[in-house]
Image (tube, rainbow, N blue to C red):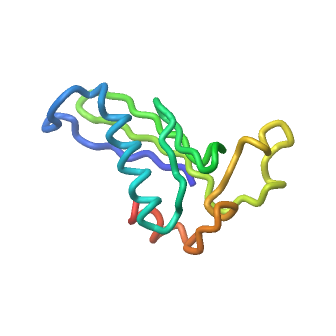
Amino acid sequence: MLFTLAVPSAGLKGSLSQAPLVLGVGLQRALTGLGLEEVQLRWPNDLTWQGRKLAGLLVEQDGGHLLIGLGLNVAQEADAFSPEIRERAASLKLAGLKELRREPLLAAL
């Protein structure tokens, strides 16, 4: 699942350089709240499960907006990943998360 969220940056407090960390921790908490255990934030912008990359997060500022981009592996089986990354990649399905419908998942995130 790939998506970008545009958030007005005018009212944001603190340094925008902290945004990736804050958003990464929020994403980690959301996935843990959905029942996925062992999710770790690997600074600066990756989420891992058992040491395997599960998601990538990018944040940039464009004009008056903070653009938050997220790529999250949802329903891939192991053979969906190329042989070069298969041992380093994970998905929510491989991690055993039962709820894989994208709409409720996106709402939780």
> Residue 87 is drawn in which quadrant?
top right
Q: Could you tell whether 46 is left or right of 30 in the image?
A: right
Q: Could you tell whether 1 is left or right of 12 in the image?
A: right
Looking at the image, is 61 positioned above or below residue 31?
A: above
> What x and y, as percent, mark residue 29?
39, 55
Q: Could you tell whether 64 is left or right of 71 in the image?
A: left
Residue 78 or residue 49, whichever sits in front = 49
Give me the residue at 26% from left, 28% from top: 16
Q: Could you tell whether 78 is left or right of 67 in the image?
A: right
Name the quadrant of the N terminus. Answer: bottom right
> What x and y, as percent, mark residue 77?
76, 60
Give me the residue at 22% from left, 40% from top: 8
Give me the residue at 14% from left, 34% from top: 13
Give me the residue at 64% from left, 67% from top: 96
> What x and y, as percent, mark residue 24?
41, 42
Name the quadrant of the C terminus. Answer: bottom left
Looking at the image, is 95 positioned above or below residue 48?
A: below
Count every numbered label the image shows and give the total. 0
